[in-house]
Amino acid sequence: MHVFAIDLLDGPQPQETSATVIQLTSSPPRLSIVVLPFANIGGDHKEEYFVDGITESLTTDLSRISGAFVIARNTAFAYKGESSNLRQIGRDLNVRYALVGSVQLGGNRLRVNVQLIDAKSGAHLWAERFDQALADLFEMQDEIVARLAGQLDARLVEAEAHRAERSPDPDSMDLYFRARALINRGSTSEYLKPAEALLERALALDPNNVDALAAKGWVDMDLGAGFMTDDHAARLASAEATAIKALSLAPNHAWAHLVLGSFYNTVNRGAEALPNSSMR
């Protein structure tokens, strides 16, 4: 499978073709990933629906990560059953990461192995194994997918942060990912203060970076609500203002909603966080 761009030319065209076809050479988008069809280790075709279900559900859940670019299920399943070169897949689909895995059902046990691969280098970035007693398959599928999606969110951010640290000229999103990786490590001033400095640099470069705005609101909430600074009241006010600005740019941004809801609860204005409440 190859990805092509079509460059429509101005002026007279050769009769044989009306377009020049060139292979894409642009860098893969950040947080770009393909979830390749998981392998059915047992080989029992009756279990194929469960194995494919994990792949499809993970594709759906990862697409909900803010800023993620996830290859569609139909495209990913074109590689089902193939022993493919992950670097070539990365080039074909123009993605940074590939998620591969296997499922084995045997007796009363279920085992799921998952690996996150850097599609450019082929390096293994992260691996996880689920090995537990077999119960209701659909409930187990939901549990496994939820746990994987949550862990992958953090792992992908960490991978992007490492890329950004090597950048000689980081842009706003590079700085955001570096800050986000620090925030993920813990809600203490040890991590929040350097994260704040990175976010301020990110917003200086792009004041409308919604992800950086939401992260800055989160940092202000943690520092203010935790009384980690002397200006905790100003911190809470900043968290509200920043979250409102983020939502004015992206009304469905989940993290910004979480920041604003946390602010309302902290200052005993919880009713304003209800769906039918108007946002000031």
Image (tube, rainbow, N blue to C red):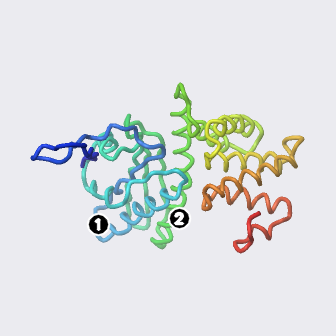
Inter-mark Cα distance, 1 to 2: 22 Å
Q: Residues within 10 Å of mark 1 (few under 14, many from 20)?
A: few
Q: Where residue 230 sits: x, y (%)? A: 89, 41
Identity of the residue drawn at 39% across and 44% down = 95
Nearer to me, 223 or 17 = 17
* SS for dot 1: loop
Quarter of the image with the C terminus is bottom right
Q: Where residue 85 sits: x, y (%)? A: 28, 42
Q: How crowded is mark 2: few (under 14 residues within 10 Å), some or many (20 or more)?
A: few
Q: Quadrant of residue 240?
A: bottom right
* Label located before the other in sequence (1 or 2): 1
Residue farthest to the right?
230
Disc 1 residue type? Asp
Question: What residue did someone put label 1 on?
Answer: 44
Nearer to me, 19 or 197 = 19
Question: What residue did someone put label 2 on?
Answer: 143
* SS for dot 2: helix
- Can you say whether 63 is above or below 233 in the image? below
Identity of the residue drawn at 47% across and 52% down = 129
Residue farthest to the front?
11
